[in-house]
Amino acid sequence: MLPAHADVVVVGGGSCGSVVAARLSDDPDRSVLLVEAGPGYRSVLDMAAEIRDAATVPVGPHSSWTTTFPARLTPEIVTTVSRGRVLGGSGAVNGAYFVRARPGDLARWPASWSYDEVLADFRAVETDADFPGDLHGSDGPVPVARVPWERLHPVSAAFHETAVSAGFGTVDDLNAPGPDGVGRVPLNIRDGVRVGPALAYLLPVLHRTNLAVATGTDVLRVVVENGRAVGVEVADGAGIHRVTADRVVVCAGAVRSPQLLMLSGIGPADELQRLGIAVLHDLPGVGRDFTDHPEVAIGYRYRRDLPTGSPLIETVLHTDTLELRPYTVPFGTAIPGSGVADPVLGVVLTRPRSRGRVVLDPADPRSAPTLDYRYLGHPQDRADLREGVRLAADLLAAMPDIVDASGLTTHLGTSLHLSGTCRMGADDGSVVDERCRVHGIDGLSIVDTSVFPAVPSRGPHATAVMLAHRIATRAWFR
C-alpha cells in the first residue's frame, strides 16, 4: 500500500533511482518511497532468466521489460527505440558495459564535477576485480571485471589483434585516463549475471522499514504549490492517489523525466500552451538539445560457426571521435525478436555535434513521446562517421579467418545513450543546477542521464551510477 507521505519520493526505479533510493534510505530517520512504472522483484530468484543472464539483452520487439518510443533518427529514417521499464530500468536489460566518462567529458560539466572531484565517487560505486589501487574501488556494490584474455570470444580476440596490427595501442584499463586504443571492456557481470544497480544497491536494503517500493505504479505529475514540489500524483491498479513529500527526486530517465516535468507544467511555455498544459514555470531547456551516440552497424558474415553465450561486447577500439564495437554474436541471438541474423561491427560517433529534442504527442501528451534525434545534422558528424565506416571495413578485411567481408551492409541506428534532456548548468538552456535541483522550483531534483550536459564519449551507465551516488550521499537536497 502506498504511504500518504514520504520525506522523499523517488520517481523511477531505474539505475539512478535504485541508487538514490538505497543511499537516501541509509538514514533511518528519513522515509523514502520509490515509485516504478514497470514490474519488480525482491530477490535474484524472483528475477526473470533474461534479466539475470548477461548474455541476453531483452530489449527486442514485444519485450516485457521495455517501453518503445517512436523515433526520427534523420528526416528520412523513422524507427523505434526501447528503454527499460522494469525495476532497474535500462541498467537491468543492457549489455553490462560499465565504462567511465573521460576527464575531457567531465570538463564540460560544472567545475564541481571535474574528473578529480568525482574520482572518489567512481571508486565508491565499484569493486574492480582486475585493477586494485587508487583509480578503482575495492568494496563498492557494483562488480567490475574484464573477460580474461584467454576466454575472449574469437571475434573479440581477432579484432583486438587486428587493431594492434593496424597500429593502435593496447589499453589495459579503459576506465583509467590515458591514450585511446583497443582494450577489453569493463563489465558489471558476476558469474554470468548482469549486476545492475537494482541488484547491487536496492535489493540488499528492501528490508528497511523506512524504504517503500511501489512497482506497477505510474507517476502522473509532480504536484507543485507556490513554487515548491509538495508531492506526486500516481496511478496504480486501485486508482489515482496523491502522496505528499518534502522532496521529489525524478529519476525517470532521459525520455520520461522531461515528459513528466512538462506534464507537471514545467517546461517551454510555448510548447506547453500548444499542448493545453497550464504553465507553472517556464523552463525552455526541458526536452531540448539532447545528445546521443549515432551508430552505424556494418553487417558481414562468419566464415565458420562460432560460440554463443558471451557478453555482447568484450573489446572496443577508441579513437578521438569513434568507438568500434565487435559484437560477439548477431543481435538476433543476443536480442530476442530483433531478427538481425548477421553479425555486425558497430561504428559509434562518440562526440556528436548534432542535437535532438523530445516531442510530446499533441493528441495525447501522456503517450510515448517522439524522439527527434536529428542525427548527422552537422557536417562534421557525417565526415567522422564516414571515416569510421572506412576504418571498420579495413579492419574486417584484415580478419579473413573469421570474417567474410564481401558484400558489407550498413545501417544507421542509435546506441541508446540519450542524454541532456534536462541539462545541468547555469545558462538559459539548463534545467538543473550543479546539485541537480530544478531551476525555479524548490523541493524538486532530477538525477539521471537527462542532466548530463552532453553524452559522454563512452557509454553513460557507469557515469550515471556515479552521478546518483554522488548526489545521494551528500546533503545537497537540503
Image (spheres, rainbow, N blue to C red):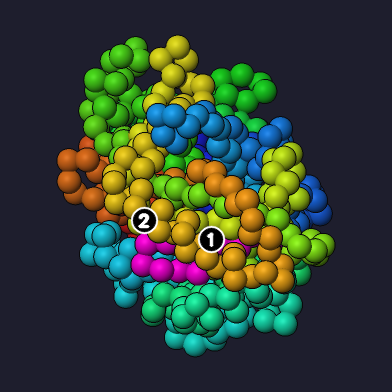
Alpha-carbon neighbours of circle 1 within 10 Å: few (<14), some, or many (≥20)? some
- Where residue 350 sits, quadrant-wise, is bottom left
Task: Residue at 72% x, 82% y: name it.
Answer: 150
Identify the element where label 2 is drawn. helix
Give the x, y percent position of residue 200.
63, 62
Amino acid at circle 2 = Asp
382 shown above or below 108: above
Give the x, y percent position of residue 83.
57, 40
User: Where does the magenta region start and end?
Assistant: 317-328
131 or 315: which is nearer to us?
315
Residue that badge 1 annotates: 393
Task: Residue at 40% x, 29% y: name it.
Answer: 75
Task: For marks 2 and 1, give the CA distance.
Answer: 14 Å
> How many labels were placed on the picture?
2
Instruction: Report the residue that reaches farthest toward the front.
Output: 406
Give the x, y percent position of residue 252.
49, 40
Identify the element where label 1 is drawn. helix
* Lower sequence index among marks 2 and 1: 2
- Where residue 13 sits, quadrant-wise, is top right
Residue that badge 2 annotates: 384
Task: Residue at 53% x, 80% y: name it.
Answer: 164
Task: Residue at 74% x, 77% y: name it.
Answer: 151
Give the x, y percent position of residue 20.
49, 53
Say whether residue 55 is magenta. no
